[in-house]
Image: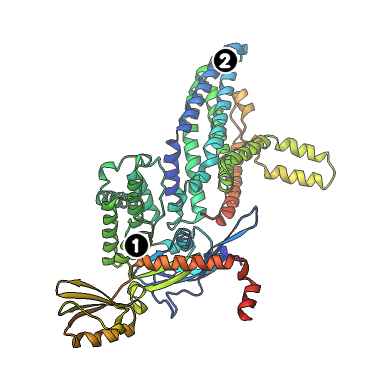
Amino acid sequence: MTDTSRMETDTRERPGTGQAGLGAALVATGLTKVFRDPWTLRSKTAVEDVSLTVERGETFGLLGPNGAGKTTTLKLLLGLLRPTAGRAWLLGEPAGSPGSRVGVGYLPESPYFSDRLTAREFLTFSGQLAGLAQGEARRLGGHWLERLGLAARADTQLRKFSKGMLQRVGLAHALLGDPELVFLDEPMSGLDPLGRREVRDLILECQERGVTVVFSSHILPDVELLCERVAVLAHGRVARMGPLDELLETGEHGSEVVARGPQPLLLPPRLAGVTHEVHGRRVVLRATTAAALGELLAYLPGAGYEVESVTPARRSLESVVLEVAAASGEAAVAARAPGSGRRERQRRAG
Amino acid sequence: MIAVIAANTFREVLRDRVWFVLLGFGFVLLAGSKALSPIALGEGGRLTVDLGLSALALLGLLVVTVVGASLVHQEIDRRTVHVILARPVSRTVYLLGKWAGFTASLWVSGALMGLGLTAVAWWVRGPQAVLPTAQAVVLICLSFAVLTALAVLFSALSTPLLSSLYTLSLYALGWWTADIRSFAKALAEPVRSGLTAVSYALPNLELFSARLAVAHAEPVPVLQLALAAVYAAGYGAAVLGLAALAFRGREFK
């Protein structure tokens, strides 16, 4: 059986009915996509062994540098591409089948629509494809155009729309008909700050309504604000995945201590790794390790300082993504390097 | 869902500028056929109707090769297909909708031109020419259904230029299927069987011709009309089935 037929017909192990991933909005296991050039026969692995579970009502971010495999992953989930290996389910239905896309909205990256249609005609068509009756699709399309500030251009052909306006029409298309699961590929792309804010508000509204949102974005502050969990992809693989708080949590990256006491603060040599900034009577100290934090907290009361707060210093999401990109870049370079093969391994072993 | 996609395709095709250019061209040919009638030495009425029917068939062929050949490919190329196939729509339904909408747009145009041509036939040849002309228009419209199915097949698999070439080639060969079979009889096996099989795989467009009936201003036999309708449905379904099969494995990067 080919991958194609497997994706379209295999309904034996539905995650919605089994133990693992019970009720999950999205489950992907070992999703892999290898593109083969029919002329040169060269193959390129775009996505490799991606496994994800997104619970219903969750907002999940897919991050990573360009070419990391985010869009390919979304297309595999929506059946626009066929996986070379692995399986996925959307709302309990095997991905790739038309049934898996019932209740699913999708905003493609840089969306293109038939430019001979008006915005209203396109949204009516889109709503009908989602299963709405023509009148209802037209009414809801009008509602979304109004909501996104395009009511005045509702009967203008889409070829006369700017990139930002097309992006808004794409959002209306994705959210039309109250989907349970929404995929947004770079939803902030092409939008001005006001438009970005509107998109953020829309995603927050989706969260309130319990809609599952999976979105990819390069605008990391928005991801930090909106997502509960993220996966960082690099070279087609999931390099990091987990709750945002965990990914950004200090661990080995230190803590921030705010204390009030006499100035100037003189730290003993054993706390040489601790940095500090003075803000009036307050001092903000940063300890980079758990051991240094322990020693600092033991020292401060004795030196006449009252500790007001201890908070784990959070890394920015940007630093996490950059770290992953750098690490994967090094790994890729190492894999391509002449000494990375058998001889190098022998040298290390020897 | 097929009707939804068909209605949208119908609207989109009718808004294509190329469509208007070709439709204008068709009406010019129709008018030109009347203008040429005085040089036909008493056969002016027949020549007018003949040329009008040829103009209608040519218009259909031009629309199929220019608009139809890029019908699906253009949607893939511009990625507009992504927003459709990301909805609960199967690829087969998508192709059937595209075919139905495109065919309907050709039928509507064919009916409009056919009405004009039938009126002209009445004017130049009398009431006895109305029925054969109208029947000939119906047959031409049925042949459009076969040609659009071929255009959808090639458009789903190839570039617009190649699709046009394939469709035109099959159109040309489609008028010679009987000749190909006669020619095959003179050859040795297994070439004879092979060529005969190929001739049956080609669209038999001769079935959609009402040249004799129109020439004699006699009604087209009902059997020919029924056979043409059944053939158009069967051949069209087979080609669309092939297109659906091939389109199933298509990837949208």
Badge 1, how many Cα within 10 Å: few under 14, some, many 20+? some
Q: Is residue B230 above or below residue A302?
A: above
Amino acid carrying mark 1 in the image: Leu
Using the image, name the chain to which the residue with label 1 belongs: A
Which image quarter holds the N terminus of chain A? bottom right
Using the image, name the chain to which the residue with label 2 belongs: B
Residue B118 in sight from this viewpoint: no
Tell me if A132 is positioned left or right of A5 in this view: left
Picture quadrant of residue B165:
top right
Where does residue B77 sit, x and y in percent of width and height? 50, 46
Residue drawn at 43 percent across, 81 percent down: A19
Which image quarter holds the C terminus of chain A? bottom right
Badge 2, how many Cα within 10 Å: few under 14, some, many 20+? some
The residue nearer to you, when weighing A32 against B130, is A32
Tell me if A338 is positioned left or right of A196 in this view: right
The residue nearer to you, when weighing B55 against A16, is A16
Q: Which residue is mark 1?
A: A220
Q: Is residue A88 above or below residue B252?
A: below
Q: Which residue is mark 2?
A: B36
Residue drawn at 48 percent across, 59 percent down: A67
Where does residue B150 sit, x and y in percent of width and height? 59, 43
Residue B137 in sight from this viewpoint: yes
Where does residue B98 sit, x and y in percent of width and height? 49, 46
